Image (tube, rainbow, N blue to C red):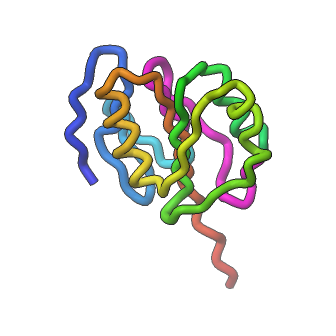
Amino acid sequence: MKLRADRIEGQNAIARHGRDGVIVNNVEHRESVIVPWQGDVLPWSVDRFEDLAEVHFTKLIALDPELVIFGSGERLRFVRPALMRGLIERRIGVETMDTAAACRTYNVLLAEGRSVVAALLFESAPARSS
């Protein structure tokens, strides 16, 4: 889905999203990705929801957001709260939604001037057996 993103210089608006990735600042990202409100878009080294670990969420703390929008893939899935313990202990808000909704919500919060991070899961297709 193409989004109309009113981009302010230095901000990372999501211009397009789909089941295979996102476009941010005219760059296509086809794997799981961290999109901070400003700065570099970062790879997020997780290929499957089942592989999520505390370290994946701890990586977000260094970005110092007020809110993290977690896009859980094509459908809404919640991770164990223990995986987000570091964010919660630092009073960083976390909202979980499917990845498409996370992209839209991220852009709305970005337009409001919030320091928001989107942690977007794009799962690798399972290998087909012969």
Q: Is residue 35 magenta?
A: yes
45 or 111, nearer to the observer: 111
Would you identify the image quadrant in which residue 80 lies? bottom right
Check the image and name the residue furthest to the bottom: 130
Check the image and name the residue furthest to the top: 9
Figure label count:
0
Estimate the x, y position of residue 103 in percent, counting from the top left: 39, 45
Q: Is residue 91 magenta?
A: no
Report the predominant secondary structure element of the magenta stretch.
loop
Estimate the x, y position of residue 93 in percent, counting from the top left: 58, 34
| Residue at x-position 54% and y-position 50% | 96
Estimate the x, y position of residue 117 in percent, counting from the top left: 51, 31
48 or 110, nearer to the observer: 110
Estimate the x, y position of residue 3 in percent, counting from the top left: 24, 44
41 or 120, nearer to the observer: 120
| Above or below 112: residue 21 | below
Q: Is residue 113 left or right of residue 60?
A: left
| Residue at x-position 49% and y-position 63% | 74
| Residue at x-position 60% and y-position 21% | 63
- Quadrant where the C terminus sits is bottom right
| Above or below 130: residue 47 | above
- Quadrant where the N terminus sits is bottom left
Write the start and end of the magenta stretch as one range: 34-53
Q: Is residue 120 left or right of residue 16?
A: right
| Above or below 121: residue 110 | above
Would you identify the image quadrant in which residue 22 lies? top left
46 or 38, nearer to the observer: 38
Q: Is residue 62 left or right of residue 20?
A: right
| Residue at x-position 65% and y-position 27% | 91
